[in-house]
Image: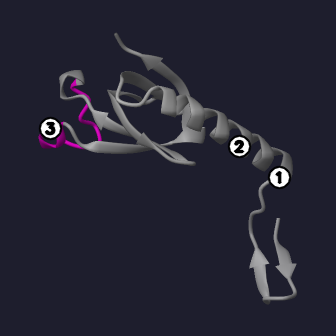
Amino acid sequence: MRVSSPESGSTIVYKADQVWCDHVRKTRKRLSGISAQCMHRPVRVQTIDGHTYEGTVIGSDAGHLYLQVNPAAGDYRFLGPFAAGSILPLVLYELLVITLLI
């Protein structure tokens, strides 16, 4: 759906549904609080796309969880074998499961 914007002369090619935006904001806020509780703890994180990562939560903000990748987990799909211990920013609203590891 294309909608013309008279004030700028541009064409909007996508506009998110307001209900979806409200739900994402609410989920992001909830996950920010959960992320703070997991600070400096080992976790396993699964995204909505099925990717799984293990590491230690070293930070979070309003939109991201920062995970220091666990080199023992052996998951080097995106970082390569020489990037063990790298920091991986994960988008909060794309997370499906956060599991604390003991």
Tell me where residue 63 appears, x and y as whole percent.
Answer: 55, 48
Q: Earlier in the sequence, mark 1 or mark 2?
A: 1
Quadrant hosting residue 15: bottom right
- Residue occupied by mark 1: 17
Look at the numbered disc 3 and give the secondary structure of its residue: helix
- Residue occupied by mark 2: 24
Q: How many marks?
A: 3
Q: Earlier in the sequence, mark 2 or mark 3?
A: 2
Q: Nearer the viewer, mark 2 or mark 3?
A: 2
Q: Main secondary structure of the magenta part?
A: loop
**Residue at x 50% of width, y 33% of height:** 36
Q: CA distance from mark 1 to mark 2?
A: 11 Å
Q: Amino acid at mark 2?
A: Val
Q: Is residue 90 visible?
A: yes
In the rendered view, tell whether residue 38 sits above or below residue 89. above
- Does the magenta segment cover residue 80? yes
Q: Amino acid at mark 3?
A: Pro
Which of these two is toward me, 51 or 95? 95
Q: Amino acid at mark 1?
A: Asp
- Residue occupied by mark 3: 81
